[in-house]
Amino acid sequence: MLPVLLFLLLVPMILNLAVWAKIVVIDAAREGARYQALRLGDPSYIVNETLIDGRLKPDNVDQVNVSEGQAYATVEVRYNQPSIVPGAGALFGGSLFGDTIPLSSKSVFKIEQ
């Protein structure tokens, strides 16, 4: 009974942390796309800075994809949010045996001329 009770107590806390991380990842992708659209430099820099400001670890970034067309800049950020409960990531799209929750966000900005 104790493992089930602990699981039920910890999952809401993990869910809150995952929602917070998702909001920060969305913001990081948006800032990266804005940075690329304004041609201010490498968007990975501002993505990492945004993650640090949101109290997330840039070491957990899986990848930052940057693409640019004639009129739009796109940045996609993939982040692995750590979970303290093994298998809880499977509830949110992760591996059953992993200890992370995969989060991603994609943002598109119009390139300023």
Image (tube, rainbow, N blue to C red):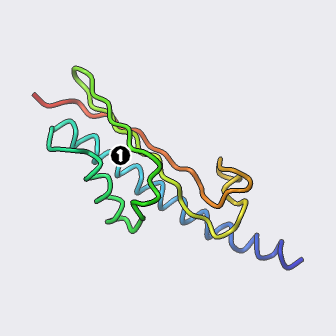
- Comparing 99 with 4, the one in front is 99
The residue lying furthest to the bottom in this view is: 2
Q: Position of residue 65 (x, y in %)?
A: 38, 38
Residue 7: which quarter of the image? bottom right
Secondary structure of the residue carrying numbered label 1 = helix
Please tell me whether residue 35 is drawn above or below residue 111 in the rendered image: below
Q: Position of residue 97 (x, y in %)?
A: 73, 56
Left or right of 21, for residue 98: right
- Which image quadrant: the N terminus? bottom right
Q: Position of residue 32 (x, y in %)?
A: 28, 45
- The residue where tag 1 is placed is 29
- Which image quadrant: the C terminus? top left
Please tell me whether residue 101 is drawn above or below residue 16 in the rendered image: above
Left or right of 74, for residue 92: right
Question: Which residue appears at 27% of the width and 31% of the height?
Answer: 73
Question: Which residue appears at 43% of the width and 55% of the height?
Answer: 23
Question: Which residue appears at 68% of the width and 67% of the height?
Answer: 11
Amino acid type assigned to the residue bearing label 1 in the image:
Ala
Q: Position of residue 62 (x, y in %)?
A: 47, 49
Please tell me whether residue 112 is drawn above or below residue 23 in the rendered image: above
Left or right of 93, for residue 79: left
The residue lying furthest to the right in this view is: 1
